[in-house]
Image (tube, rainbow, N blue to C red):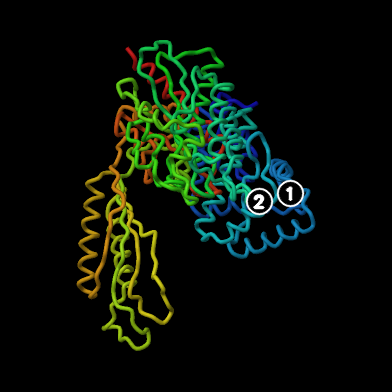
C-alpha cells in the first residue's frame, strides 16, 4: 500500500505522479502540479490539493479531463482506451451485464448526452465498501442530468471525477472509512421505516408519532444501547431518543448534541439524522476503546423538527428548552387525530413533558452536525463547513387586490393587474436581497385564484420569506420591501392584505465552540470555510438557553435536500466523525 511518506519523499513531480498513476483518467498532469504542495499530512489534504489543481486549471483543461473518461456504455465499454480502474468500476456496477433493452437505453442516452453537452456522462458508480450503484439508478441519474444547463453539468461531471479519484486513492492507500461506512449503513437501515402511502412508492416520509416514526425511535434506542454502549437510553415524554454516555467526573457539565429524526414528505436520509448518527459513532468508538472523557456526552434524537403532521416545529428541542406549547396538544392532523391522542396511543405521558426541561448550567453547550442542504460546499469542493450563524427569518402571506377585467378590451394604461403588482414586488425583493451578503428573499407561493387566460388578474396571493444572519439586516430588508409594496400599490391603483406568520431570531454561533469546530477541521488537513445556515435547525432552539455551534457536511447532487436525491458519501461522513472526535479532544484540553 502507498503511504504519504512515500509521496512526500518522491524525487520529482514525475515520480510523485507515477505513484498516483490511474487516479485521474489519462491525466498525470494533475498529480504533477499537486506535487508542489508537499508535504501532505493527511489523505484528506492530498485529495483537496488534487481538486484545487483541477479547479485552477481552467475550463479547457477541465473539458479535456472529462473527455478522457469513457462512456457508460454497457457491453460496449471494453475498448483500448478504458483503464483497468474504469473497467473494474463499471463491472462492479453491473454495466457488463446489461439486458439488451438496458444496453440500447444506455446507447441512446450516451448519444443524446453527447449531442447536448459535447462530453461524456461521468458518474461515480462505486459506493461504500466497493458496492456499485444499481443499473436502474445509473440510468435514472443519466436521464435526470440530461436536463441540466451545460455549465452546471460540466461542474457535476468534475465533482463525480473527483469522487472517482477519491475512491481510487482509498484503494491505493488501503484507507477504509470505517466510521463513515457505519453511519452510512445506519442511515440506510433507518430509511427502511416510512409512513403508509409513501413506503409503497419507495419514498421516505416519517412524521410525528406514526408507526414508522416510533420504529425509528426504537431503532435508534437499540443502536445506542446495544452497539454504542451508552450508559442510559430512553424515549422521553415527547418521543425524543436520549442517550447518555457518562464522563469520568459525574459532576462535570455534559456536552449536548443531536438533531431530529423526523422527515419532510418524500424527503432524504440525512437531514437531521446525520447529527444523531455521527456522535453515536463517536460514543461507540469511546466505548470500544474503554475510554471515558472528563465530561459526559448526551445525544438526543429530537422527535420532531419539520412540523409536517402537526404545525409544531421544533417540538422535540422545544421540550428540552422548556418551550413546549400546551396548545399544540389540541392540534389535529389531516385525519382529525389530536396530538394529545397520538401521544397517548404511543404510550407517552403528557404530564411528564414539563420535566424534560434541561438546566443550562449542567451543560457545556450544544453542537450539531448537519448536512448542508445547499450547493456551496459542493461548488467549492470542500467536505465540511463551519456555520457562523443560523439565519433569522420572517414570513408573510398576503394578497394583492386589483380589478379583474377583459384581457382584450382593457387598455394597458387602465389596468389594475394584481399579478403584475406582485411580479414587480418579486423583482424588487430579488434586487434588494442581492444587495447585501448573507441576505435572501423568496416568494415561494404565487397563485391567481380562478385565473383565466383571457382575464386581467383581479387577485393574486403570494408569500414572502426573508432571512439574514442578523435580525437587523433582515428587518431592514423587510421594512424596505413593505415600503415598496405600499408604494407600488399607490402607483398601480391596487390594495393589499399582508399577515406575518413567523418571526424567528437569528442564532449566531458561540465564538468559542465555532473556533473548536474550525480547529477540528484544520486538524484533518482541510481548509476552513465559514458560512451561514439559511435553514433553521434544532441548534436554533438550543441557542435560546445555551451556547451552540454547527458543522455542515457536503451533500451530493449539488447539495439538494428535502428530496430523495439528498445524499452524502462515506468519506465525507468519515471526516465529520473525525472532526467531532477532534472537537471532543479540544474540549478536554481546555479543561482545568
Tell me whether circle 1 and circle 2 mark residues in contact (CB < 8 Å).
Answer: yes
Q: Secondary structure at mark 1?
A: helix
> Quadrant of the rendered structure where residue 218 is?
top right
Picture residue at 61% right of the left edge, 28% below the top: 175
Of 129 and 222, nearer the camera is 222
Q: Is residue 385 above or below residue 80?
A: above
> Quadrant of the rendered structure where residue 317 is?
top left
Residue 56 at least partly seen: no
User: Dot 2: within a 10 Å radius of its alpha carbon, few (fewer than 14), some, or many (20 or more) residues?
Assistant: some
Please state the horizontal and vertical placement of residue 378, each as a whole percent of the image.
48, 45
Q: Is residue 280 left or right of residue 313?
A: right
Please state the horizontal and vertical placement of residue 45, each as a whole percent of the image.
49, 32
Of 146 and 407, nearer the camera is 407
Which comes sooner in the sequence, label 1 or label 2? 1
- Numbered label tally: 2
| Nearer to us: label 1 or label 2 | 2
Label 2: which residue? 138
Label 1: which residue? 95
Q: Is residue 184 above or below residue 3?
A: below
Q: Is residue 297 left or right of residue 485?
A: right
Q: Is residue 427 above or below residue 231?
A: below
Quadrant (top left, top right, bottom left, bottom right) of the C terminus:
top left
Please state the horizontal and vertical placement of residue 325, each as a whole percent of the image.
34, 39
Amino acid at each position: 500500500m502507498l503511504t504519504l511518506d512515500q509521496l512526500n519523499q518522491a524525487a520529482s513531480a514525475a515520480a510523485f505522479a507515477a505513484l498516483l498513476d490511474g487516479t485521474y483518467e489519462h491525466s498525470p498532469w494533475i498529480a504533477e502540479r499537486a506535487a508542489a504542495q508537499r508535504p501532505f499530512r493527511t489523505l484528506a489534504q492530498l485529495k483537496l490539493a488534487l481538486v484545487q489543481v483541477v479547479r485552477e486549471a481552467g475550463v479547457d483543461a477541465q473539458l479535456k479531463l472529462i473527455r478522457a473518461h469513457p462512456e457508460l456504455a454497457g457491453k460496449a465499454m471494453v475498448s483500448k482506451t478504458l483503464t483497468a480502474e474504469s473497467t473494474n468500476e463499471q463491472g462492479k456496477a453491473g454495466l457488463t451485464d446489461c439486458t439488451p433493452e438496458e444496453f440500447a437505453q444506455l446507447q441512446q442516452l450516451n448519444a443524446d448526452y453527447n449531442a447536448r453537452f459535447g462530453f461524456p456522462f461521468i458518474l461515480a458508480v462505486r459506493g461504500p465498501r466497493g458496492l456499485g450503484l444499481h443499473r436502474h439508478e445509473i440510468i435514472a441519474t443519466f436521464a435526470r442530468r440530461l436536463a441540466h444547463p451545460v455549465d452546471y453539468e460540466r461542474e457535476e461531471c468534475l465533482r463525480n471525477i473527483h469522487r472517482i479519484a477519491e475512491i481510487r486513492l482509498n484503494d491505493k492507500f488501503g484507507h477504509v472509512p470505517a466510521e463513515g461506512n457505519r453511519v452510512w449503513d445506519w442511515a440506510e437501515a433507518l430509511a427502511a421505516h416510512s409512513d403508509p402511502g409513501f413506503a409503497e412508492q419507495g419514498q421516505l416520509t416519517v412524521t410525528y408519532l406514526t408507526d414508522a416514526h416510533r420504529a425509528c425511535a426504537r431503532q435508534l434506542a437499540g443502536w445506542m444501547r446495544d452497539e454504542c454502549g451508552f450508559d442510559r437510553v430512553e424515549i422521553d415524554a415527547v418521543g425524543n431518543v436520549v442517550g447518555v454516555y457518562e464522563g469520568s467526573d459525574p459532576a462535570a457539565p455534559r456536552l449536548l448534541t443531536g438533531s431530529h429524526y423526523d422527515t419532510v414528505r418524500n424527503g432524504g436520509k440525512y437531514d437531521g439524522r446525520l447529527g444523531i448518527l455521527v456522535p453515536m459513532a463517536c460514543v461507540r468508538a469511546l466505548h470500544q476503546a474503554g475510554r471515558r472523557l472528563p465530561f459526559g456526552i448526551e445525544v438526543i434524537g429530537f422527535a420532531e423538527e419539520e412540523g409536517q403532521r402537526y404545525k409544531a416545529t421544533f417540538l422535540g428541542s422545544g421540550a428540552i428548552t422548556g418551550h413546549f406549547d400546551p396548545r399544540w396538544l389540541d392540534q389535529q392532523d389531516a385525519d382529525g387525530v389530536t396530538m394529545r391522542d397520538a401521544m397517548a396511543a404511543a404510550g407517552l405521558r403528557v404530564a411528564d413533558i414539563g420535566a424534560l426541561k434541561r438546566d443550562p448550567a449542567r451543560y457545556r453547550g450544544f453542537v450539531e452536525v448537519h448536512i448542508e442542504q445547499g450547493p456551496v460546499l459542493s461548488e467549492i469542493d470542500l467536505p465540511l463547513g463551519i456555520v457562523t450563524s443560523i439565519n433569522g427569518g420572517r414570513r408573510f402571506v398576503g394578497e394583492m387586490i386589483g380589478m379583474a377585467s377583459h384581457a382584450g378590451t382593457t387598455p394597458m394604461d387602465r389596468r389594475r393587474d394584481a399579478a403584475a403588482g406582485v411580479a414587480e414586488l418579486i423583482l424588487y425583493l430579488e434586487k434588494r436581497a442581492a444587495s447585501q451578503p448573507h441576505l435572501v428573499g423568496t416568494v415561494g407561493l404565487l397563485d391567481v385564484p380562478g385565473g383565466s387566460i383571457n382575464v386581467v388578474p383581479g387577485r393574486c396571493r403570494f408569500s414572502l420569506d426573508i432571512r439574514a444572519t442578523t435580525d437587523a439586516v433582515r428587518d431592514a430588508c423587510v421594512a424596505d420591501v413593505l415600503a415598496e409594496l405600499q408604494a407600488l400599490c399607490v402607483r398601480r391603483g391596487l390594495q393589499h392584505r399582508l399577515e406575518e406568520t413567523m418571526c424567528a431570531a437569528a442564532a449566531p454561533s458561540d465564538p468559542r465552540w465555532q473556533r473548536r469546530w474550525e480547529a477540528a477541521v484544520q486538524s484533518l488537513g482541510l481548509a476552513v470555510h465559514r458560512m451561514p445556515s439559511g435553514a433553521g435547525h434544532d441548534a436554533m432552539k438550543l441557542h435560546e438557553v445555551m451556547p451552540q455551534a454547527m458543522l455542515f457536511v457536503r451533500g451530493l447532487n449539488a447539495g439538494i435536500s428535502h428530496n430523495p436525491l439528498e445524499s452524502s458519501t462515506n468519506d465525507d461522513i468519515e471526516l465529520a466523525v473525525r472532526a467531532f472526535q477532534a472537537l471532543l479532544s479540544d474540549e478536554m484540553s481546555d479543561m482545568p
